[in-house]
Image (cartoon, rainbow, N blue to C red):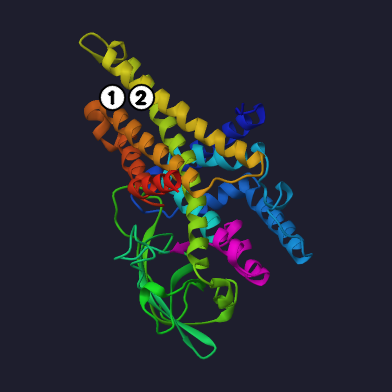
Amino acid sequence: MFEWSDEHQMIRTAVREFVDKEVRPHREALEHGDMPPYELLRKLYSSFGMDQMAASSFDRRIAKEEAGETGRPTADADGEGDAGGGGMTLLPIIELCKCSPGMVTAMGVSVGLTSAAIMNKGTIAQKKRWARDLLTLDKIGAWAITEPNSGSDAFGSMQAVARIDGDEFVLNGSKTFITNGPFADTIVFICKLDEGNPPAERRVVQFVLDKGMTGLEQSKPLRKMGMHSSPTGMLFLDDVRVGTDRLLGESLDAYAAKAGREASKATFTIERTGVAAMALGIIERCLELSVPYAKSRIQFGQPIGNYQLIQLKLAKMEVARLNVEGLVFRTLEMAAAGKGMGLAQASASKLYAAQAAMEVALEAVQIFGGNGYMAEYEVEQLARDAKVLQIYAGTDEIQITHIARALLA
């Protein structure tokens, strides 16, 4: 049975102290969108040596690839492969989510989704050119798939296109709800290849773009319900010309049949697996706030924690915490065994964890009553931030579809 080790607890305490000292004082600025999160994230990385570890891990992995070694990277190659190392990755996510979940989204899309797309599909030269700086947070990344008319139907309704023009590609289209979009240095742009065939038959391809390219426009941050510390924007491409060096894999041969779609789905799996850790942080913080409040809030001459209805809420919150923690431990145990979650497993984990976080956060607001509706009591923010866990990386409804299809296959 997996559980947090003494070393894990030490790291957790250190991260918690960092969050209290470096992040929590800026919570209002982060929450109101006045302060992008990137310098705080870089400070986190440098304070705990995460940037150096990421760089060393990357260099070892590339050295092995250049030597012709293949197969799934080992713990030495990418920092995975043991539950202890995985715990060191997830604990900062959990602790950051207790204060500013949006920072985790911004970090995860940059060092997770964007770099993973390049590491999974790119050539060695492309990995050196873009992925290393993303993994160390020297550069900020964005993974651009969603469009105004293609949310859950990401591939079927995709309108962004790449057209072949001699030795180059010409990219056109728009993307929306793109995490880090307003500030991204490196963008993985996913579109369809227009070879004169019907849209439904077109191959899905991926390109890497750099900030400031001619024809590329990055919008200002969009206003939204929650996750305010995670800048979200739109991308507009108007005849952006790129060479094959920016096509991930550098050859269209790598995009035969549905290879491009499968590569994007693999990235979805990574994203969905991380949601459980985010949900756990939100749930733990709701309990940290609600239990003391239930003890100290006096109504009708006694603490509200004495009333069974409040006890029921707290008990259900604790059950949710235990269950979501179990999902996180499951992820770590699989990593220790050298395994990763399949799409259906990741979807099940995300579905449960996201719903649990939302339910717990709303119960926390209810326990606080009128105070819970006020921004100063923090649970209001946690409730708004939790909601998007049921939407991004695939809505609850899409997760149900993936789970059911796997069962019926």
Tell me where the magenta segment starts and ends, as one range: 115-144
- Residue that badge 1 annotates: 367
Q: Nearer the viewer, residue 45 or 132?
A: 132
Three-letter amino acid code of the residue under disc 1: Ile
In the image as oriented, which residue stretches furthest toward the bottom? 166
Q: Residue at x 29, y 53 (%)?
A: 224
Q: Secondary structure at mark 1?
A: helix
- Residue that badge 2 annotates: 290
Q: Residue at x 32, y 33 (%)?
A: 359
Q: Position of residue 27 (x, y in %)?
A: 40, 43
Quadrant occupied by the N terminus: top right
Q: Can the viewer see residue 343 in this picture?
A: yes
Which image quarter: residue 190?
Answer: bottom left
- Please give the label number shown on residue 291: none
Three-letter amino acid code of the residue under disc 2: Ser
**Mark 1 nearby-residue class (10 Å; few <14, some 14–19, many ≥20):** many
Q: Main secondary structure of the magenta part?
A: helix
